[in-house]
Amino acid sequence: MSVPRLRVLLVGASGVIGRWVHQALADDCEVIAAGLDDPQHRVDLASTDSIESMLRAVTVEGGPLDAVISAAGRARFVRLSDIDAADSGQSAYTLGLHDKLMGQVNLALAARAVLKPGGVIVLTTGTTSREPIIGGSSLSMVNGALECWVRAAATELGNGLRLNAVSPSLVEGTPAAACAAFPGFPTVSGAHVALAYLRCLRSGLTGQVLSA
């Protein structure tokens, strides 16, 4: 049985995970790539204005979207011993809160206006929501909060929209410096992780966080 060709915006398309998701979607979707350094559709998730400008440009070019997938979001590795109450809101946690957490939340909220009825939103969290690492308190906080938000927000999106998240483990191709922060973690195939995004897109799930 053939599946309909979907128009999908992929934020973070040039990243480690985004490249695998792009490859998995390419055969039966029209994929519009976007990202912090994308030459055509640049978007800074930490800026609501940037998100809204990018969405306007994408829809002006080709009309409403069937899905918005975020494989993006930045956070900072900082040991707890280097964080105190005076600077926790300014240096150690600010990037993750503004970019990976609220950036993806704001992307999802803004996407409601450009998605077709029954459209899909897929966000990205991460393994630190359930498997802490040294220096990863910022990531654990952000990923855990985002997963809770996805489950709650999915209940009231309206217009038949669906919202899910993928929580990937350490993906093949991750730079060595980042891998060093995850001692003893197995490396997961990028193709395997991409399947979780396809499941969120195609299976009818909503309010789910899929571990990959």
Image (cartoon, rainbow, N blue to C red):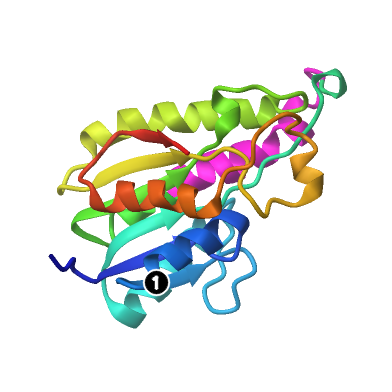
Residue most extreme to the right:
82
Which of these two is toward me, 90 or 171? Answer: 171
The correct choice, above or below, for 83 with respect to 49 in the image is above
Which residue range is magenta in the image?
A: 84-106
| Residue located 79% across and 31% down the image | 78
Q: Tell me the element at label 1.
A: loop
| Residue located 76% across and 35% down the image | 77
The image position of residue 169, as x and y in percent, is 57, 37
| Residue located 67% across and 55% down the image | 173
The image position of residue 128, as x and y in percent, is 60, 28
Which of these two is toward me, 157 or 22? Answer: 22
| Residue located 44% across and 43% down the image | 105
Q: Which residue is mark 1?
A: 26
Residue most extreme to the bottom:
61
Which of these two is toward me, 64 or 24? Answer: 24
Magenta-colored stretch includes residue 95: yes
The image position of residue 208, as x and y in percent, is 33, 34
Q: Is residue 50 left or right of residue 52?
A: right
Position of the N terminus by quadrant:
bottom left
Magenta-colored stretch includes residue 28: no
The image position of residue 54, as x and y in percent, is 46, 68
**Secondary structure, magenta segment, majority class:** helix
Q: Is residue 121 left or right of residue 5?
A: right
Q: Quadrant of residue 29?
A: bottom left
Circle 1: residue type: Ala
